[in-house]
Image (tube, rainbow, N blue to C red):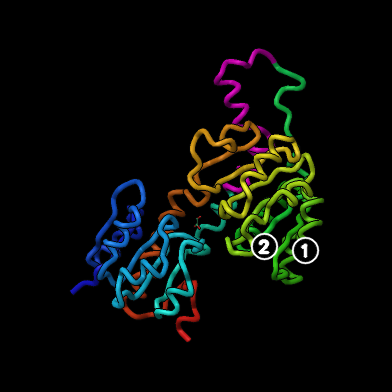
Amino acid sequence: MKPRVFVTRLIPDEGLDPVRQACEVDLWTDDLPPPRDELLRRVKGVEGILSLLTDTIDDELLDAAGPQLKVVSNFAVGFDNIDVPACTRRGIPAGNTPGVLTETTADLAFALLMSAARRIPESVEYVRQDRWKTWGPMLLMGVDIHDATLGIVGFGRIGREMARRGRGFGMEILYQDVHPASAEDEAELGARRVEMDELLRESDFITLHVNLTDETHHLIDTDALHAMKPTAVLVNTSRGPVVDPDALEQALRAGEIFAAGLDVTEPEPLPADHPLVRLSNCVVVPHIASASKVTRGKMAAMAAANLLAGLRGEHLATPVNPEVYE
Ligand code: GLV
């Protein structure tokens, strides 16, 4: 008999096809995630769950699934939606999809950086509103990207790709991470590790690439924003709650920083009438950093491979709780 699995949303065929071949699949086909009570009902008795970052995987859900559950495979690199210790306590490996989305995510982060710096959405809107009447010496002036200082908070895979992109624009690269990069990596990427206050003070662009944890929750708060230059641009493609949204709104309104580009927000999604959406110096896109066709296909294939490995009792290629195998 094929193992029963619940797939919490329609994902690209690169992932769905192999799962369908090997499993009896219950697939949630709505555009919106399964509501909590539905999720709890649908996981009952399954051996595997292919989840998204919009699904909370916690004690309640693992209990609702039952003791036959063998694996949770998240279609995302971030896994703050999963209570990892709760999985580990039950001996359940949980997987994520690192690596395949690194460059696509950095591409979008850099696009946000450029959009916010050069006021691109605002300029497009200006033309659409038929306000473009002449070439203007002071029209829609932004801040320069080339030769500026780029501060990278979180120097993992995606943070390092930002360094590469920044170097292409002649930027000076500063970074902050609890784990220093090796001297060779620092030399190759032309990056210098500094304390957070120096990074906030010295950077023209600050881009966030940390996991969401208790330590990084509201890492960018009123004090952090005060420390930035009035010409600074903040970019967030990590997780929304790394930035205090009220503090950011205040800083953008008061001109304490120049602009922000956000792929992730708190709350998420943001309603259209949210102040951060309405502010002309805030560029908000709907959590699309890894959304290229090729990359989403690779993520789907990787999530499927983790799911199927877990069902077979094999080690996941990319477990977030490798301690489960000890
Ligand atoms: C997207 O945010 C991801 O974590 O993959």
Coordinates of residue 4 in the picture (x, y in percent): 24, 68
Distance (Cα) linking label 2 and label 1: 9 Å
Is disc 2 surrounded by few (<14), some (14 to 19) or many (20+) residues within 10 Å? many
Quadrant housing residue 189: bottom right
The type of residue carrying mark 1 is Arg
What mark, if any, has residue 155 been given in the picture?
A: 2
Q: Main secondary structure of the magenta part?
A: helix
**SS label for mark 2:** loop
Q: Which of disc 1 and disc 2 is earlier in sequence?
A: 2
Q: Residue at x 24, y 72 (%)?
A: 3
Residue span colored magenta: 108-134
User: Left or right: 169 with respect to 261?
Assistant: right
What mark, if any, has residue 221 been given in the picture?
A: none
User: Left or right: 246 with respect to 56?
Assistant: right
Q: Is residue 79 above or below residue 241?
A: below
Q: Is residue 52 magenta?
A: no
Q: Is residue 125 magenta?
A: yes
What mark, if any, has residue 193 been given in the picture?
A: 1
Q: Nearer the viewer, residue 210 or 159?
A: 210
**SS label for mark 1:** strand
Coordinates of residue 86 in the picture (x, y in percent): 44, 74
The type of residue carrying mark 2 is Phe
Q: Nearer the viewer, residue 250 or 54?
A: 250
Question: Are dots 2 and 1 in contact, CB under 8 Å?
Answer: yes
Q: Is residue 144 above or below residue 44?
A: above
